Image (cartoon, grey):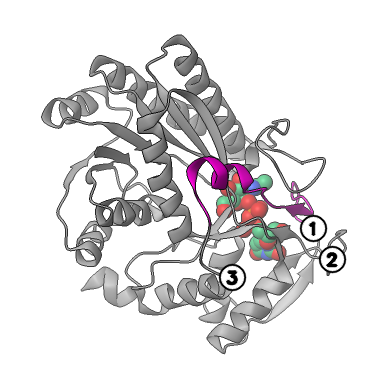
């Protein structure tokens, strides 16, 4: 298949491009580098020894999308391009609604124009809000606690309405749990600008001594050791889930929802201890107050993705800790060569 990847230079997008190319698909990437680096494209080529087409620009730019669809026969779209910082979405809600909704609507309009009806969407476990029980299944009630999450939920609704209106459409919605890790080569990974909000990028910065110590947000939750529990999934496993999803989209109609997680929850302390052990490095930490909006535990029931997509994660929490660190300690080299 020839697949358009929006946000293909981003963290999850770039790993997915590698998996698609290695599986023999052709890809076309569109990215505006608002939160990524041009060098990522070279690194995808280095890993795969494959070529692909690339367009620099914004997915909200309809003329650009029409040009891409005119110049390429696109069979399916995987839509990653979006803003994703929870805190920023609270202070700049309109920026989030404008960007995260307009991109999807514009894409869908142009797909209709060019008779392309296979769509895979990057959603998030954030759409489950504060779940009443665990593990989380796809049919659990949906709610959100911040504008970022609301844009994910609104996108899901838009896609579902479009698939209802046009029976030719096939939409696969992937709800990611907590992606961490990096490509084994050290050539692709995550390195957010500024002080990280998410746990693994923060741990890595403490390990490299760029930050003095980790604040663990609460040790009085009703969990195994009192710290928050999450379902961390290696980004390479997550990328492989997109390969399964694209195959499913090509052979089914309507809208389908899948959790992409491992099904196992690890606490903050467990993640810190594992990171220290596999990388043989200390991560100093302090216990801090709970972070507003956090829930105690969140992990997936991955059964549906296994039964219907044949998706099963393979990489361990040790792999995630090793690869996250490896990417950061080698990244200067890979991004500047
Ligand atoms: C958050 C978002 C989710 C998004 C995901 C991206 C919410 C409600 N959820 O998930 O929508 O998809 O990021 O990966 O905002 N922690 C610390 N110290 C830190 C940072 C985090 O103790 O410095 C703890 C948190 O309290 C939590 C766990 O680590 O228990 C994971 O936090 P984080 O990596 O930020 O992810 P989520 O909040 O689960």
Q: Position of residue 178 (x, y in %)?
A: 59, 55
Where disc 3 sits, the SS reads helix
The main secondary structure of the magenta stretch is loop
Give the alpha-carbon distance from disc 3 to disc 1, as whole Å: 24 Å
In three-dimensional space, the C-alpha distance between marks 2 and 1, rounded to whole angstroms, equals 11 Å
Residue 334, percent from left and from top? 28, 72
Residue 169, placed above or below residue 273: above
Marks 3 and 2: CB-CB under 8 Å?
Answer: no
Q: Nearer the viewer, residue 266 or 302?
A: 302
What quarter of the picture does the N terminus occupy? top left
- The magenta segment is 290-312
Residue at the disc numbered 1: 290
Query: Dot 2, how many residues are within 10 Å of its Cα: few (below 14), some (14-19), or many (20+)?
Result: some
Q: Position of residue 258 (x, y in %)?
A: 56, 39
Residue 67 placement (x, y as % from top left): 16, 27
Numbered badge on residue 226: 2
Q: Left or right: 135 with respect to 14?
A: right
Q: How many labels does the image show?
A: 3
Magenta stretch encompasses residue 298: yes
At a point 30% along the width and 16% down the height, the residue shown is 112
- Find ligand 1 in the image and state its quadrant: bottom right
Residue sitting at x 66%, y 72%:
271
Helix, strand, or loop for circle 2?
A: loop
At x 60%, y 57%, the residue is 262
As drawn, the residue found furthest toward the left would be: 71
In three-dimensional space, the C-alpha distance between marks 3 and 2, rounded to whole angstroms, equals 19 Å
**First of labels 2, 1 by sequence position:** 2
């Amino acid at each position: 298949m020839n697949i358009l990847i929006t946000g293909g230079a981003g963290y999850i997008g770039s790993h997915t491009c590698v998996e698609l190319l290695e599986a023999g698909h052709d890809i076309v990437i569109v990215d505006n580098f608002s939160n990524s680096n041009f060098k990522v494209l070279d690194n995808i080529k280095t890993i795969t020894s494959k070529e692909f087409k690339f367009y620099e620009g914004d997915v909200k730019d309809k003329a650009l999308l029409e040009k891409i669809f005119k110049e390429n026969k696109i069979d399916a779209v995987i839509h990653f391009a979006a803003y994703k910082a929870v805190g920023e979405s609270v202070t700049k809600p309109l920026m989030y609604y404008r960007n995260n909704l307009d991109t999807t609507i514009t894409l869908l309009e142009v797909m209709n124009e060019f008779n392309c009806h296979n769509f895979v969407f990057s959603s998030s476990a954030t759409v489950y809000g504060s779940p009443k029980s665990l593990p989380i299944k796809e049919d659990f009630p949906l709610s959100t606690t911040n504008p970022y999450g609301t844009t994910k939920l609104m996108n899901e609704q838009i896609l579902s309405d479009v698939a209802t209106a046009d029976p030719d459409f096939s939409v696969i919605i992937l709800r990611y749990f907590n992606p961490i890790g990096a490509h084994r080569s050290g050539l692709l990974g995550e390195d957010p600008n500024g002080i990280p909000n998410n746990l693994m990028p923060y741990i890595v910065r403490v390990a490299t001594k760029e930050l003095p110590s980790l604040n663990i947000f609460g040790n009085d939750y009703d969990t195994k050791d009192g710290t928050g529990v999450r379902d961390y999934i290696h980004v390479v496993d997550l990328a492989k889930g997109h390969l399964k999803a694209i195959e499913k989209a090509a052979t089914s109609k309507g809208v389908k929802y899948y959790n992409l997680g491992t099904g196992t929850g690890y606490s903050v302390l467990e993640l810190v201890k594992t990171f220290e052990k596999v990388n043989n490095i200390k991560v100093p930490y302090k216990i801090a107050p709970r972070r507003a909006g956090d829930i105690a535990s969140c992990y997936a029931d991955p059964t549906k993705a296994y039964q219907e997509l044949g998706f099963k994660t393979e990489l361990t929490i040790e792999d995630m800790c090793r690869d996250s660190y490896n990417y950061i300690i080698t990244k200067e080299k890979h991004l500047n060569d």
